[in-house]
Image (cartoon, grey):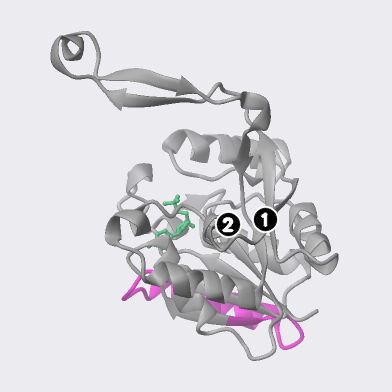
Amino acid sequence: VPTAVVIVAAGSGTRLGYGLPKALVPLAGAPLLLHALRGTAGAGLAEQICVAVPPGDTELTALCRTFAEELGATAPDIAVVEGGATRADSVRAALAALAPGIVHVLVHDAARPLTPPEVFRRVCDALDRGASAVIPATPVVDTIKSTAPTEGDAAAIAAEVVTGTAVREQLRAVQTPQGFDAETLRRAHEVAAGWDPEQAAAITDDAMLVESLGTPVYVVPGDLQAFKVTTPLDLHFAETFIAAQGG
Ligand code: C5P
């Protein structure tokens, strides 16, 4: 089945504190995006890889071009598009640049550089079995509570107070790549393009847009190695992990 992988790499990376787009932040001597490109191409499932880079970027674009040259003609075609202000805008820009005839689309964060190929395969297998939407996920280890800001006298005690506790056994921590039937993902993003800014700001993954269409989103096992690099501690952990693997 003709499959494309969208890699979203247009984030600012402010939480890492590098003053660089996150995808350019070095990990074991290579930018995060290069790890994601190698992992994605290495999984061997994509005819096309479409990378969304920050508007005005030149460095990540050059990195994609060099990677494509190294791969040669037989490997997936690499396309580069300008991302947008939000992750969903970046995905929309990439969807507009997909090759005609693409049937399945995986959307992957550049910020998950150590995602094993098995996760890509599990997602694609579920699409092949008929799913329109598939996410990889792991059980949650922390107890998750909702909170609200304190008011009045309570504000002198602490800034927030608990409003509820979720049932942990029902919760999953969701990773990427998330896989979709291309038409379903396009439709979901078209609908979300009309949402008001507050709703749009609450979009954190693609699957939630498909959920809002009422389409079932299936869950396959993720992998702890597919964790997202968000904070300096995550980067430190990724460095240590690679060093322990001998690479
Ligand atoms: O900010 P967060 O860590 O959730 O970003 C997840 C992924 O989405 C990252 O790979 C980031 O580069 C990407 N992103 C994007 N365009 C944006 C914001 C985030 O491609 N405007």
Question: Whereabouts is ligand 1, in terms of quadrant?
Answer: bottom left
Q: Where is residue 168 drawn, in percent x and y?
A: 62, 25
Label 1 CB-ligand 1 distance < 8 A:
no
Q: 30 above or below 138? A: below
Residue 75 included in the magenta stretch of the image = yes
Q: Mark 1 points at which residue?
A: 217
Label drawn at residue 211: 2
Which residue is at 54% across, 60% downward? 206
Q: Which of 73 and 156 is in front in this view?
A: 156
Q: Where is residue 84 drawn, in percent x and y?
A: 36, 70
CA neighbours of label 2 inside 10 A, class few (<14), some (14 to 19), many (20+): few
Q: 207 above or below 105? A: above
Relative to residue 245, is residue 8 drawn left or right?
Answer: left
Residue 106 occupies quadrant: bottom right
Q: What element carries label 2?
A: helix
Q: Where is residue 34 drawn, in percent x and y?
A: 57, 63
Q: Residue furthest bottom?
A: 100
Which residue is at 69% across, 78% downward? 71
Residue kind at label 1, given as amino acid type:
Val
CA neighbours of label 1 inside 10 A, class few (<14), some (14 to 19), many (20+): some
Q: Which of 239 and 96 is in front in this view?
A: 96
Q: Where is residue 44 drawn, in percent x and y?
A: 78, 70
Q: Which residue lies furthest to the left in this view?
A: 152
* Quadrant showing the N terminus: bottom right
Identify the magenta region.
53-78
Which residue is at 32% across, 48% downward? 14
Which residue is at 58% across, 40% downward? 238
Residue 213 occupies quadrant: bottom right
Mark 1 vs mark 2, CA separation in Å: 7 Å
